[in-house]
């Protein structure tokens, strides 16, 4: 890919201006840091617009909110297809044979459908798999990447062949992309994306199913004694977990309290990845109650990284404990998804009663050293 596809760091004034532009007072704690970095990456299929990533560096891993913007008009990437719909309706979508695959891959990165799980892949480096399962998909992906093809169709549309991940398997995909951005998958399953059925706002942080998503995940945690204790601890301190819209999954606990967990807007119930982030946010809050912190992000870098690694190890240890309790309760699918995140070796070591020092070494090797 060209240099235009690379991320570029913007200066502090541009960052401060952008934060002020996208700030929502209803979610003020998300925009109250003094330690942001703003990144920009061109999108070759949108005329005049780019992908902006607002990175909060108060925590490691950094907490990021994503947008599409032309510097004046900002569209929050809420995990649904609607920001791209709005831009397509404005006439800024400009597809051709050179960029239609980039569009497809970007679409599947930013728009998640819990009941239509299809992911397009054009680069072996961007495979969604990690851990032991990655090797099997790696070889299949190599085979299908050699057969990527784009064929112009009638009315400016495109017929595309590329690898897709569907139902956990990497297979050959056949996709018809309309000039207006609509995506119609014909193989391995018939699915249409970008259905244009809902109204949408440009900056839509609120999650339409926030209470349902939280309750469904809390219901799962009732099968874990530690999960129950963390929920009760948060209630005792009069704080809560808030589900917000966004890409993929992550969490953030600001100094002011409460925990924020990202869920794509189309999720309306339990999801394992949101469950893991809810657990992490609950444990993060408990560590705050006990007087622990992540250190000063503006202080000595190595010390800050070490403080965060130790802090995150406590969160990971809690995750392992709760996942183990849920496994004992029969939630095998949760264990599979935890391993899929790349924690298979760490979880196995935990079950074999590895010491925290051993887990720390594995964790830092996995997360901080790649």
Image: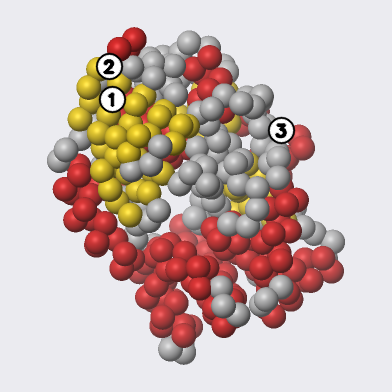
Q: Residue at x 64, y 27 (%)?
A: 198
> Quick check: 95 above or below 165?
above
> Mark 2 to mark 1: distance in Å?
6 Å
**Label 1: few (<14), some (14–19) or many (≥20) C-alpha neighbours in 10 Å:** some
Q: Position of residue 214 (x, y in %)?
A: 71, 56
Task: Give the position of the N terminus as an image quadrant.
Answer: top left
Indicate which disc, 2 or 1, sits on the residue closer to the N terminus.
2
Indicate which disc, 3 or 2, sits on the residue closer to the N terminus.
3
Question: In this figure, which residue is indicated by the disc labeled 2?
Answer: 153
Question: In this figure, which residue is indicated by the disc labeled 3?
Answer: 24
Please tell me which residue lies in front, 332 or 297: 332
> Quick check: 194 above or below 48?
below
Q: Position of residue 239 (x, y in %)?
A: 80, 59
Task: Give the position of the C terminus as an image quadrant.
Answer: bottom left
Q: Position of residue 58 (x, y in %)?
A: 57, 51
Q: Which mark is residue 17?
A: none
What secondary structure is marked by label 2? loop
Badge nearest the viewer, 3 or 1: 1
Question: In this figure, which residue is indicated by the disc labeled 1?
Answer: 159
> Mark 3 to mark 1: distance in Å?
40 Å
**Label 3: few (<14), some (14–19) or many (≥20) C-alpha neighbours in 10 Å:** some
Q: Residue at x 57, y 83 (%)?
A: 328
Please tell me which residue lies in front, 33 or 153: 153
> Quick check: 73 above or below 232?
above
| Residue 208 in the figure: left or right of residue 297 | right
Q: Are marks 3 and 1 in contact (CB under 8 Å)?
A: no
> Mark 3 to mark 2: distance in Å?
43 Å
Q: Which residue is the extreme one toward the bottom?
A: 353
| Residue 30 in the figure: left or right of residue 343 | right
Q: From this viewpoint, is residue 331 visible?
A: yes
């Amino acid at each position: 890919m060209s240099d235009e596809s690379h991320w570029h760091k913007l200066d502090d004034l541009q960052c401060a201006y952008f934060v002020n532009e996208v700030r929502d007072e209803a979610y003020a704690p998300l925009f109250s840091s003094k330690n942001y970095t703003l990144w920009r990456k061109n999108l070759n299929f949108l005329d005049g617009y780019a992908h902006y990533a607002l990175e909060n560096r108060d925590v490691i891993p950094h907490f990021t909110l994503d947008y599409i913007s032309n510097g004046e008009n900002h569209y929050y990437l809420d995990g649904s297809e609607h920001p791209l719909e709005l831009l397509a309706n404005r006439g800024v979508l400009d597809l051709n044979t050179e960029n239609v695959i980039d569009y497809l891959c970007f679409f599947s990165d930013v728009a998640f459908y819990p009941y239509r799980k299809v992911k397009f892949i054009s680069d072996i480096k961007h495979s969604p798999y990690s851990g032991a399962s990655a090797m099997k998909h790696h070889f299949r992906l190599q085979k299908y990447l050699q057969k990527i093809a784009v064929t112009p169709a009638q009315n400016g549309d495109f017929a595309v062949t590329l690898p897709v991940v569907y139902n956990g398997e990497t297979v050959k995909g056949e996709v018809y992309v309309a000039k207006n951005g609509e995506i119609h998958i014909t193989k391995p399953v018939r699915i249409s994306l970008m259905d244009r059925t809902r109204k949408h706002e440009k900056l839509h942080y609120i999650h339409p199913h926030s209470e349902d998503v939280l309750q469904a995940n809390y219901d799962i945690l009732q099968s874990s004694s530690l999960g129950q204790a963390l929920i009760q601890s948060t209630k005792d301190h009069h704080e809560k977990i808030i589900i917000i819209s966004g890409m993929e999954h992550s969490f953030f606990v600001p100094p002011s309290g409460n925990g924020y967990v990202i869920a794509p807007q189309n999720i309306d119930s339990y999801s394992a990845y949101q469950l893991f982030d809810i657990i992490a946010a609950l444990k993060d809050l408990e560590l705050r109650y006990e007087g622990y912190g992540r250190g000063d992000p503006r202080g000595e870098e190595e010390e800050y990284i070490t403080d965060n690694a130790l802090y995150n190890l406590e969160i990971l240890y809690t995750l392992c404990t709760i996942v183990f309790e849920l496994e004992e309760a029969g939630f095998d699918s949760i264990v599979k998804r935890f391993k899929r995140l790349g924690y298979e070796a760490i979880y196995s070591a935990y079950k074999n009663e590895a010491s925290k020092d051993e887990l720390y070494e594995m964790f830092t090797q996995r997360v901080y050293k790649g």
